[in-house]
Image: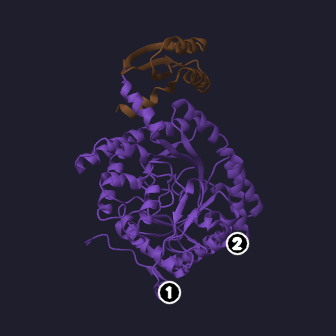
Chain colours: A brown, B purple
């Protein structure tokens, strides 16, 4: 089966444990992280991860789990299939 | 990772802050095989075919929107122009067909079903006349059925007998729904040069050149264009056009991808992508505000048409490169009741009915969602329609009229249609009569395609 990839983007105030919490959810859902890039921009933590979601049946469930963390930590977390960015930003 | 963080952020911002959305995924369904000598049988076949073909439409679309993080606002259905099914049916049966369509839409949870339509731009068949007779009652008895009537094309001219009838039909539909401020008229469009693959309501129908079933997608994003332009307050107009083009490109690509995924999962061919800037009453989701951002103090002032022409063309250029199959109406819609900027323009007396007519020469459709004073006579409405049809016929473009004469309301009053249809200030119409012109009937001959000065 061909690989299906999604991008998880995280933005918010920098604090202890962001990566731990986000990756814990991914691990719980058996998702492999393929790439991570992360920076701090004017006190703002910004991270994006490319994850393999070939096995994931339900991105919706995952988004809900992320929403919980978003609320706890005051972050903005989105998960979307990678194709959408490819088609909008690459010819 | 070959996508930059800024690009991901841009997409997310477009969706969450700037109202980027797939406005509609519309499934076109041919109903020709439902024709049956027995009318009840036909009704049953129509209901069964629509509900089985589109049974998964809403659930699949919702699944796709979650996976890609782009909202799909409406899931809709368009059908073969209903007049083609009617044959020998009576007016009561034609109304019954509309009720069946309404029931199918309700069962599927789609907000509008389009195609209660007739193409009478040259002449009127028996079935089409039955549909025209049934229109006012059908649209006032149903909630989700949309109708459209083609009364003119560049190749055939204008069927003035049909134009005359449409004035009367609009007036009657308005009177039948006077408790709801003439709401039935909001579901009825009169067309010149209609397109067969338009996914947007109220003018969607599944044209005779189309296949068995098709998925057409309408994408929108006035808010995205507005915000993109705000970053270039001092750019010259060539650059403005370029910014709009690039934005339109991105929006269209998103729509095309989503449309193809939905079509693929439903196992139905992908038809076309209609890139139209269709405003809503949401904050900053306004076509008028884009024109104001380009540099007009208020929409409707001198320069409005030039700015609209620039924008409409740039949208088409960006969209044309982004999709393999651009179709529908693609351009900018200028509905009044669904656009806060247009409403403000009228309230501030900057925007008038004649100016709106002139704007339709360069926008993608026509006079749309305009509330008119309740004393507008059928012949004045027909005159208004005839003018708009002439603009479309001569300019070889689609034009449309969707106006609502609001019973008991006069110029300056405000009406609320609710939901997506919004609210509109009532506009007055010219007090002088068009009676004689309209009662002459006949056809306006098709125009020359050369000597076009």
Q: Is residue B412 above or below residue B1?
A: below
Q: Chain for mark 2? A: B
Residue B10: image quadrant is top left
Give the image location of residue B290, x and y in percent.
37, 51
Residue B266 visible in the displayed image: no
Of badges 1 and 2, nearer the viewer stands: 1
Q: Quadrant of the C terminus of chain A?
A: top left
Q: Is residue B361 above or below residue B223?
A: below
Q: Residue furthest bottom?
A: B436
Circle 1 residue: B435
- Which type of secondary structure does the marked residue at label 1 adopt? helix
Q: Is residue B310 above or below residue B14?
A: below
**Do the residues indicated by labels 1 and 2 lie within the same chain of the protein?**
yes
Mark 1 → mark 2, Cα distance in angstroms = 27 Å
Q: Earlier in the sequence, mark 1 or mark 2?
A: 2
Residue at figure coordinates x 47%, y 48% from the top left: B283
Say which of B292 and B280 sits in front.
Answer: B292
Residue A78 horizontal side relative to residue B246, left or right:
right
Residue at figure coordinates x 28%, y 47% from the top left: B240
Circle 2 residue: B91
């Amino acid at each position: 089966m061909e690989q299906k990839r999604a991008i998880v983007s995280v933005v918010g105030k920098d604090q202890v444990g962001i990566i731990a919490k986000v990756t814990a959810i991914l691990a719980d859902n058996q998702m492999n992280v393929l790439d991570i890039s992360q920076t701090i921009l004017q006190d703002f933590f910004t991270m994006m991860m490319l994850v393999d979601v070939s096995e994931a049946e339900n991105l919706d469930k995952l988004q809900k789990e992320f929403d919980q963390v978003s609320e706890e930590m005051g972050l903005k977390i989105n998960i979307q299939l990678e194709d959408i960015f490819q088609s909008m930003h690459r010819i | 990772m070959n996508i930059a963080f800024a690009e991901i952020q841009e997409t997310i911002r477009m969706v969450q802050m700037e109202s980027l959305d797939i406005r509609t995924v519309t499934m076109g369904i041919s109903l020709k095989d439902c024709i049956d000598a027995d009318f009840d049988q036909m009704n049953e076949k129509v209901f069964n075919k629509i509900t089985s073909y589109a049974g998964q439409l809403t659930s699949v679309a919702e699944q796709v929107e979650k996976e890609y993080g782009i909202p799909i606002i409406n899931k809709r259905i368009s059908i073969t122009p209903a007049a083609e099914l009617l044959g020998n049916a009576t007016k009561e049966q034609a109304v019954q067909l509309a009720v069946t369509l309404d029931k199918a839409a309700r069962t599927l949870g789609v907000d509008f079903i389009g195609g209660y339509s007739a193409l009478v731009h040259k002449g009127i068949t028996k079935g089409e006349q039955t549909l025209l007779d049934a229109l006012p009652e059908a649209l006032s008895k149903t909630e989700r059925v949309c109708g459209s009537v083609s009364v003119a094309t560049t190749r055939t001219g204008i069927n003035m007998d049909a134009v005359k009838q449409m004035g009367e039909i609009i007036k009657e539909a308005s009177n039948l729904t006077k408790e709801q401020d003439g709401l039935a008229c909001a579901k009825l469009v009169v067309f010149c040069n209609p397109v067969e693959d338009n996914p947007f309501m109220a003018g969607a129908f599944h044209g005779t050149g189309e296949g068995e079933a098709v998925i057409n997608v309408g994408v929108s994003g006035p808010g995205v264009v507005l915000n993109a332009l705000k970053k270039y307050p001092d750019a010259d107009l060539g650059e403005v056009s370029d910014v709009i083009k690039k934005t339109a490109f991105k929006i269209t690509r998103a729509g095309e991808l989503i449309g193809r995924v939905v079509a693929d999962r439903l196992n139905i061919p992908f038809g076309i992508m209609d890139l139209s800037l269709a405003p809503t009453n949401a904050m900053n989701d306004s076509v008028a505000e884009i024109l104001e951002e380009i540099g007009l103090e208020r929409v409707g002032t001198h320069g409005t048409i030039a700015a609209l022409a620039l924008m409409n063309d740039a949208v088409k250029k960006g969209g044309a490169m982004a999709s393999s199959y651009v179709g529908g109406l693609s351009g900018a819609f200028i509905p009044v009741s669904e656009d806060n900027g247009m409403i403000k323009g009228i309230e501030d007396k900057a925007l008038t009915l004649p100016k709106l007519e002139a704007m339709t020469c360069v926008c993608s459709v026509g006079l749309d969602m305009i509330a008119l004073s309740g004393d507008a006579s059928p012949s004045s409405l027909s005159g208004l329609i005839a003018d708009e049809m002439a603009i479309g016929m001569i300019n070889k473009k689609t034009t449309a009229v969707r106006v609502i004469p609001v019973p008991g309301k006069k110029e300056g009053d405000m009406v609320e249609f609710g939901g997506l249809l919004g609210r509109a200030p009532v506009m007055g119409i010219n007090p002088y009569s068009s009676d004689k012109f309209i009662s002459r009937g006949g056809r306006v001959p098709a125009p020359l395609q050369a000597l076009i000065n």
